[in-house]
Amino acid sequence: MSIVLLLTELQAARRAGPLQSLTPVQLRLHEHVVSIVPEGMKLWGHAWLRFGDVDVRCTVLVRRWTSDAVGVEVPVDDEKLQCWIWQGACDRLEQRTDAWV
């Protein structure tokens, strides 16, 4: 699958509604340690995101995590969108392009 197809799929999903994120109640950040990726370091993941009622799997930049959740960033249409997702919805990638098959 090419990057052009992935971007088109991501852009189409975005039109279905706003990027969904875990709620504060689900995150319980006041109870969990939050680890933050150091500045200048890139940590990539292959994650399920939800826009409105549409699910899409895409390459994301991991920004932070807890024992239960991952805070990710994804570029769409010249914007960097951020959300929290469950850890099980994100697989770590060694290289950004590892999921581009």
Image (cartoon, grey):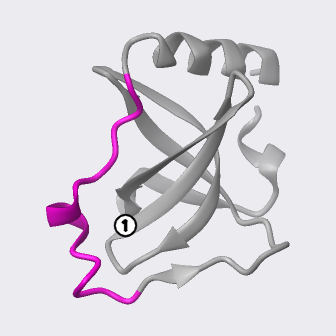
Position of residue 5 relative to residue 93, above or below, is above
Q: Which residues are magenta?
A: 18-33
Determine whether, in the image, residue 32 is placed left or right of residue 19. Answer: left
Image quarter in which the C terminus is found: top right
Residue at 78% x, 65% y: name it: 42
Residue in view at x 72 percent, y 14 percent:
5
Task: Tell me the quarter of the picture where residue 54 sits.
Answer: top left
Indicate the position of residue 46 as horizontal and vertical percent values. 59, 48
Residue 72 coordinates in the image, percent (x, y): 54, 55
Q: Main secondary structure of the magenta part?
A: loop
Q: Quadrant of the N terminus?
A: top right
Q: Residues within 10 Å of mark 1 (few under 14, many from 20)?
A: many
Residue drawn at (80%, 24%) of the image: 3
Identify the residue under disc 1: 69
What amino acid type should be assigned to the residue bearing mark 1?
Answer: Ala
Vertical comparison of 35 with 1: above or below: below
Q: Classify residue 46 as left or right of residue 18.
A: right
Residue 27, horizontal then vertical, whole percent: 25, 67
User: Element under label 1?
Assistant: strand
Quick check: is 20 in the magenta stretch?
A: yes
Residue 80 in magenta stretch: no
